Image (cartoon, rainbow, N blue to C red):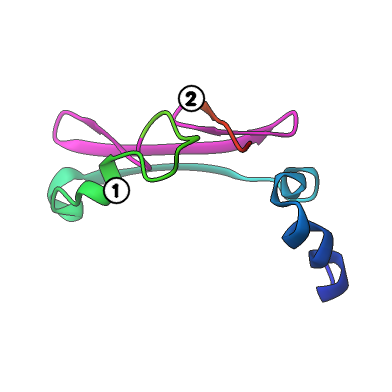
Amino acid sequence: MTLAGLIPIMMQPSIALDFFVLKTDIRLPYKLVGGNPSLLSVVYPGMQTGLFLKKGDTVVHQAETRGGKLFLNGKEVLLN
């Protein structure tokens, strides 16, 4: 992607999902994140979960783009 190709995305961020593919799956020991509330809490109004979810003594993160939508920990992130 060129710099000129990023201009439409800067003007309308929701179209970024038409250009980029994301798939992440991370598991970490809870102690490693230190209970950082910004990692476990909703930080954007369209999010339904935090970036990580606490599962026992681990934290998990899953994100992917599907059908022009962004999903975080199995829940759709509402971009509008």
Residue 10 image point, x, y percent: 73, 62
- In the rendered image, which residue does mark 1 sit on? 39
Mark 1 or 2, nearer chain start:
1
- In whole angstroms, how far apart are the C-alphas of marks 1 and 2? 16 Å
Q: Is residue 38 above or below residue 63?
A: below
Label 1 packing within 10 angstroms: few (<14), some (14-19), many (20+): some
Q: Secondary structure at mark 1?
A: helix
Q: Amino acid at mark 1?
A: Leu
Residue 39 at x, y = what percent? 29, 48
Give the residue drawn at x 61%, y 38%: 79
Q: Residue furthest bottom?
A: 3
Q: Is residue 72 magenta?
A: yes
Q: Specify few, some or many for label 2: CA neighbours under 10 Å numbering under 14, 14-19, or 20 or more.
A: few
Residue type, mark 2 in image: Gly
Of the residues tagged 1 and 2, which is closer to the observer? Answer: 1
Question: Where does label 2 land, which residue?
Answer: 74
Magenta region: which residues?
Answer: 50-74
Q: Residue at x 42, y 28 (%)?
A: 48
Q: Which mark is residue 10?
A: none
